[in-house]
Image: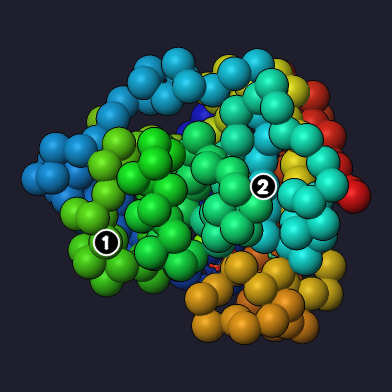
Amino acid sequence: MNWEEWKPFYLRIAQEMGYSIEKDREAAQILRALLLEGDEYILKEELEAVIEKKAYVFGAGPSLEKALKELNFSGGTLIAADGATSALLDAGLVPDVIVTDLDGRIPDLRIANGRGAFMVIHAHGDNVDKLTAYVPLFSRILGTCQTKPLDIVYNFGGFTDGDRAAFLAEALGAREIVLVGFDFGDVVGKWSKPSLGEHSPVWESKRKKFAFAQELLKWLEENGRARLRYLHP
Ligand SMILES: Nc1ncnc2c1ncn2[C@@H]1O[C@H](COP(=O)(O)OP(=O)(O)OP(=O)(O)O)[C@@H](O)[C@H]1O
Ligand SMILES: Nc1nc2c(c(=O)[nH]1)N=C(CO)CN2
Ligand SMILES: [Mg+2]
């Protein structure tokens, strides 16, 4: 999804979620400055070389645990949406790529990054504190934003970490995308926020996020170059 295709979705999301477009823009600039300062950033070509024709994208829905126990994920790139990283580590897997706005468990993200995972770190108006505190802790970082892309801060489309991971995979060459732990629905998986001890009833803003994520994944299914498949154990 290019910027022109993403823009109408973004304007509607910003309006309905009550996000400040100006703050989202500033966040992209702040991430750019942090990446230049730390000199640990990568360009999209480097990640293109990592993404295979088949990609598994792991969301943080409750079904993730069973899927990780029962199924086999060989022969494709493993892409974790933020908090799903913790479940992968518990199952003895290291994601190849992590797509995050830095609200997953930071120690687990650091462990995975230390074991080779590439970080795709997203800037938005509500995570500037986290960007400033945590970006310097990571290496091999691709920066993304939801406003107009900058030179080294990309926008492949997508809103939540999960659907954004699928858009990234498609943009960087995947042609079969298998979505695991994408339950959406009424229960938020316990890996979604460090503060959630257990799977928890969905709250209002999260329900809205899920609805946009589902709409965007449908768009990708209909307009993208990849085949999308939901895996439900
Ligand atoms: N039932 C579910 N519970 C949690 N995550 C889900 C579920 N179904 C699908 N997902 C996907 O897994 C991703 C996990 O990422 P994460 O929990 O960090 O969310 P997020 O996008 O940062 O949203 P938030 O800002 O609300 O934390 C979500 O973005 C979502 O796309
Ligand atoms: N401004 C803003 N943008 C976002 C937010 C958020 O909480 N605020 N959460 C996201 C992940 O779901 C993606 N984008
Ligand atoms: Mg997140």
State the image coordinates of residue 7 (x, y, percent, origin top left).
53, 44
State the image coordinates of residue 128 (x, y, percent, origin top left).
29, 66
The kind of residue on which mark 2 rests is: Phe
- Spatial separation of the CA atoms under disc 1 and disc 2: 22 Å
Question: Does label 1 or label 2 sit earlier along the sequence?
Answer: 2
Residue 58 - label: 2
State the image coordinates of residue 61 (x, y, percent, origin top left).
74, 62
Helix, strand or loop at label 1? It is helix
Q: Is residue 117 left or right of residue 202?
A: left
The kind of residue on which mark 1 rests is: Tyr
Pick the front one: 208 or 132 = 132
* Residue occupying the point 72% across, 33% down: 73
Q: Is residue 86 above or below residue 112?
A: below
* Number of residue marks: 2
Residue 134 - label: 1
Q: Residues within 10 Å of mark 2 (few under 14, many from 20)?
A: many
Quarter of the image holding residue 123? bottom left
* Residue occupying the point 17% across, 50% down: 34
| Label 2 lies in ligand 1 vicinity (Cβ under 8 Å) | yes
Helix, strand or loop at label 2? It is strand
* Residue occupying the point 45% across, 16% down: 49
Residue 222 visible in the snapshot: yes
